[in-house]
Image (cartoon, rainbow, N blue to C red):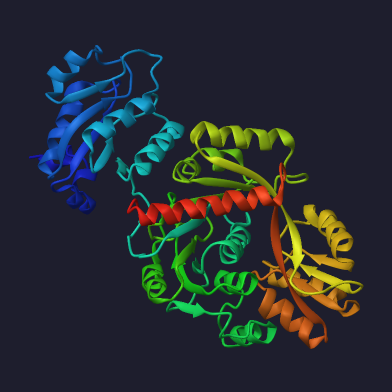
Amino acid sequence: MIDKKLFRSVHLDDLQFKGFNGKRVLCLVDGDHYPPVVKWTIEELEKSGGKVVALVFLGGTEKIRVSSKDLKDIFDLRVYLRKSRLDDSISFLVEALEEENPDIVLDLSDEPIVDYWKRFKIGSRVLEMGIDYIGSDFWFKPPVEDEVLNKPSISVIGTGKRIGKTAIGVTVARLVKEELFDPVVLCMGRGGPPEPEVIDPEKIDLEVDTLIDVAERGRHAASDYWEDALLSQVSTIGCRRCGGGMAGNPFSSNVLEGGGIANELSQDFVITEGSGPTFPPVKTDKKIVVIGAKQPLEKILSFFGEYRIRVADLAIITMCEKPYVDDEKIEKIEKGILKINPDLDVVKTVFRPQPLDEVARRDVFVATTASDQSNKSIKAYLEEEYGCRVKEISNNLSNRIKLKKDLNRSISSCDILLTEIKAASIDVAAKKAKKEGLEIVFLHNRPVPVDGSIDELNEAILSLCKKAHKSFRRGEN
């Protein structure tokens, strides 16, 4: 005799479906499935402990005559059906989510009614509303937002790596400290410490020898939290994370512990900073999303780039200049962002190097993670604004072997190593420069608006921080 279990979905037997017990489930269905098959699956689902509250019909007429009455008669459930072909199916879904308030959206549709692109659009809207989105072989969860912080807060998140998120985070921290509050930065990274570590610039001498000593003890001295503390002169809590989900969840981190430490410090405002496209797993009052203009349009505006734009309160687009991008792409990015989130403030920026110490009339070796496409503008800007002579630029901070070759080739002819605090900047570049007797100066990449003034960029950031403070005081967080 054939085992009847063979006729059941393998997915329904999966251990993750234990999470269905007592949960409210809204199902997405289409007309390319024969209705009794869909009904059979829903019955099996309810046997697994889930409570199906409604269906959203996404389209298709191959195996079904479409009318709300017919569908309700078949499934004996509330059915949401578009009134015309002109209706936006995503907006229609959002309406159903608001009315039914499910815990889980289960996608029982398939191509051609719902393809890969549409699935991500659906997922972005579902996750934005704090709801799990699952299907036959996927389970997307909204990024964790633990309400651990007991102070007003803002987060800086990104759509990828190497887009200048830490530079924006440093800028935000500097501004808040100068103009508004006494901030602390809660930072996480792939090279963070095993226990959250507080770096207080008033208690620790943040100089080259300190960071070299950290590196020689086997730790990552160029981790974002050291960069944040040194460049902003704001107390920073360094945390670690491992893994990064598509929607922004880390697989593991010690950020919640770091958040508890932030609560105990004297500072009155918290700035959390993500790592690459991964979110800190703490709830904040407002969000800034950093978007690299050189990223592929699909990554910015589709997949779960759309989700990041939807949950943000301010978008800062970086690297808005040739040779990274042309004007046409910048326009597409801005229009795409505003189509996704029409209420979002958008600021277009470029980065300009800002040495933290005097470099005038000196021969300089520049070490950066920027691509060699930017070398011409880096050299011109440093020489014109700061009066130094740029003798060599290495774009290989993230490639230790190539960086060593660049340093060996030309550092001895220079007076100063001017370096970002990234990747191998301390354990390779700074150690080599110190051995050769060079002065070491750290570099901040300062965001400068493409349209408008620095004051307008600063005001956009400060205005959002003020709103975060008000939201917290009103209990809206």
Against 340, is 260 above or below?
A: below
Q: Is residue 311 left or right of residue 399?
A: left
Horizontal and vertical percent position of residue 223: 57, 72
Q: Is residue 240 left or right of residue 95?
A: right
Which residue is depicted at the point 48% across and 79% down? 198
Horizontal and vertical percent position of residue 393: 82, 65
Q: Is residue 159 visible?
A: no
Camera-side residue of 38 and 327: 327
Against 438, is 286 above or below?
A: above
Which residue is depicted at the point 78% across and 87% down? 435
Image quarter of residue 161: bottom right
Which residue is depicted at the point 34% across and 52% down? 474
Against 246, is 55 above or below?
A: above
Look at the image and tell me in which quarter the N terminus lies.
top left
Camera-side residue of 353 and 305: 353
Horizontal and vertical percent position of residue 266: 44, 76
Against 67, is 296 above or below?
A: below
Image quarter of residue 212: bottom right
List the single residue furthest toward the left: 1
Image quarter of residue 374: bottom right
Horizontal and vertical percent position of residue 426: 67, 78
Q: Is residue 29 left or right of residue 76?
A: right
Q: Is residue 186 left or right of residue 25?
A: right
Which residue is depicted at the point 54% across and 50% down? 463
Q: Is residue 57 visible?
A: yes
How many discs mark residues in the rendered view?
A: 0
Camera-side residue of 331 and 232: 232
